[in-house]
Image (spheres, rainbow, N blue to C red):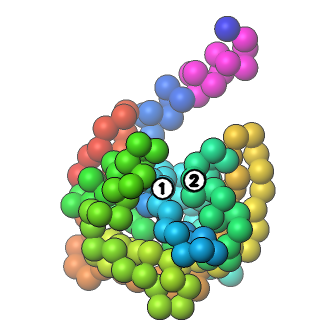
């Protein structure tokens, strides 16, 4: 095992101990095909302009759609969306990504979103940067939907979902 490989293994083991909120990132390509991917690598970048970033593996189906279109959406999941997350996390589940959940299409961009998500961020892609196996996409938030009531979160830690 090389030093770099060993560092990666221990890094991933350490990251399993970091609790993360669970999101599903969505996009639609120029032919109208919908894409979705579970992500825990979503971060607020700035309040001015309001912007978020998401890291997408270059091998993910969603990568091509986000790379070639102007819009993407970040859906912050609640506990009832655990199956949605599972469907969007595995390439084998690609055909069932939009069969679970209250999916709608944004009226302006056509990007799919979960109407009952804890929050939904409609983003216009503003920058991207390749780093290693991933591309970091920065999106300026054009619209945000926030669910009413007390926040409830779907979290992920040590390879398992938790309901908060």
Q: In which quarter of the image is residue 115?
A: bottom left
Residue at image mark 2? 61
Q: Quadrant of residue 42?
A: bottom right
Tell how many labels.
Answer: 2
Frontmost residue, 112 versus 126: 112
For residue 55, side relative to residue 164 (left or right)? right
Q: Residue most toward the front?
A: 31
Q: Quadrant of residue 128?
A: bottom right
Q: Do the residues labelled 2 and 1 touch (CB within 8 Å)?
A: yes
Query: Magenta span has 6?
Result: yes
* Neighbourhood count class around disc 1 (C-alpha, 10 Å): few under 14, some 14–19, many 20 upward: many
Location of residue 32 with respect to 58 vertically, above or below: below
For residue 54, side relative to residue 48 (left or right)? left
Residue at horizontal 27%, vertical 67%?
101
x then y, percent, for residue 43: 57, 60
Quadrant position of the C terminus in the picture: bottom left
Tag 1 or tag 2, which sits nearer the N-term? 1
Location of residue 127 with respect to 124 vertically, above or below: above
Frontmost residue, 34 versus 48: 34
**SS category of the residue bearing label 2:** helix
Q: Residue most toward the top?
A: 1
Task: Identify the magenta region.
Answer: 2-11
Report if residue 5 is visible in the image. Answer: yes
- Which-is-in-front pick, marks 2 and 1? 2
x then y, percent, for residue 142: 58, 85
Report if residue 19 is visible in the image. Answer: no
**SS category of the residue bearing label 1:** strand
Q: Residue 143 carries which label?
A: none
x then y, percent, for residue 9: 58, 21
Q: Residue 37 carries which label?
A: 1
* Neighbourhood count class around disc 2 (C-alpha, 10 Å): few under 14, some 14–19, many 20 upward: some
Residue at horizontal 31%, vertical 38%?
160
């Amino acid at each position: 095992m090389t030093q770099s490989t060993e560092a990666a293994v221990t890094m991933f083991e350490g990251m399993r101990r970091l609790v993360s909120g669970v999101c599903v990132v969505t996009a639609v390509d120029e032919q109208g095909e919908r894409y979705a991917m579970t992500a825990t690598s979503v971060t607020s970048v700035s309040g001015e302009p309001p912007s978020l970033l998401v890291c997408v593996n270059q091998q993910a189906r969603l990568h091509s759609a986000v790379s070639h279109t102007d819009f993407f959406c970040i859906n912050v999941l609640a506990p009832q969306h655990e199956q949605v997350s599972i469907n969007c996390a595995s390439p084998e589940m690609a055909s069932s990504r939009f069969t679970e959940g209250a999916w709608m299409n944004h009226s302006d961009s056509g990007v799919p979103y979960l109407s009952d998500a804890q929050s939904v961020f409609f983003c216009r892609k503003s920058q991207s940067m390749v780093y290693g196996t991933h591309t970091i996409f920065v999106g300026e938030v054009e619209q945000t939907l926030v669910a009413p009531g007390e926040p409830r979160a779907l979290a992920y830690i040590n390879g398992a979902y938790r309901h908060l």
